[in-house]
Amino acid sequence: LPQGLPPPPPPPGGRAGPAGFLFMCSTATEKDCLRLGLLGLPADALSQMKEIGPHTELFLFNFQQRRLYGVFYGTGPAAMDMEPGAFRAAHPRRFPAQIKFKRSVHDAAASAHHVGVAGPLSSAQVEDLRGRLALPLHAPPPLAPPPAPPPAPPPSPPLSGA
């Protein structure tokens, strides 16, 4: 999906794929997730991840810091080793089933204790996680480009000698 545009309308007759999907991370793997815009799970989860559609709301839970992040949206289908070097510093080859994501306009982070297990989420579970993030329930937010970096400060004038 192009940045800054809402996801396409759901297909007639309802949503394609699960309402949401939860990914887990450690503090070490969180850095790769957020830096690369990439979520990963072990290889045996790929078939479940392939069910993720353009309206599936993605969440990331850091189980060490007990921090929940979301809502994200996939930018395409899940596949094996999209970024082969990802997550290796923390867990060599443990998370080869991967999906790229974009942040939404209303993405947030919140402290959370128990959010469930990694995998597909029902509509009720998505609403619960949105509530924990203090996001509006229902209607996915539109996607937005990442924030622009702050402008560089103007150069200081040279000091004159005395």
Image (cartoon, grey):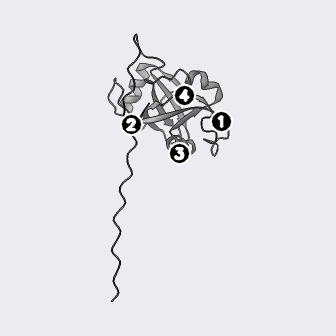
Q: Identify the residue position indicated by label 2 in the image.
A: 107
The amino acid type found where label 1 is placed reads Arg
- Residue 114 image offset from top left, x and y in percent: 48, 31
- Residue 56 image offset from top left, x and y in percent: 45, 24
Who comes first in sequence, dot 3 or dot 1? 3
Per the model, the C-alpha gap separating discs 2 and 3 is 17 Å
Per the model, the C-alpha gap separating discs 3 and 1 is 16 Å
The nearer-to-camera label among 4 and 3 is 3
The nearer-to-camera label among 4 and 1 is 1
Q: Identify the residue position indicated by label 1 in the image.
A: 94
Disc 1 is placed on an element classified as loop
The amino acid type found where label 2 is placed reads Asp
Who comes first in sequence, dot 2 or dot 1? 1
Question: Residue 118 shows which numbered tag?
Answer: 4
- Residue 51 image offset from top left, x and y in percent: 53, 20
In the image, is residue 24 above or below residue 161?
Answer: above
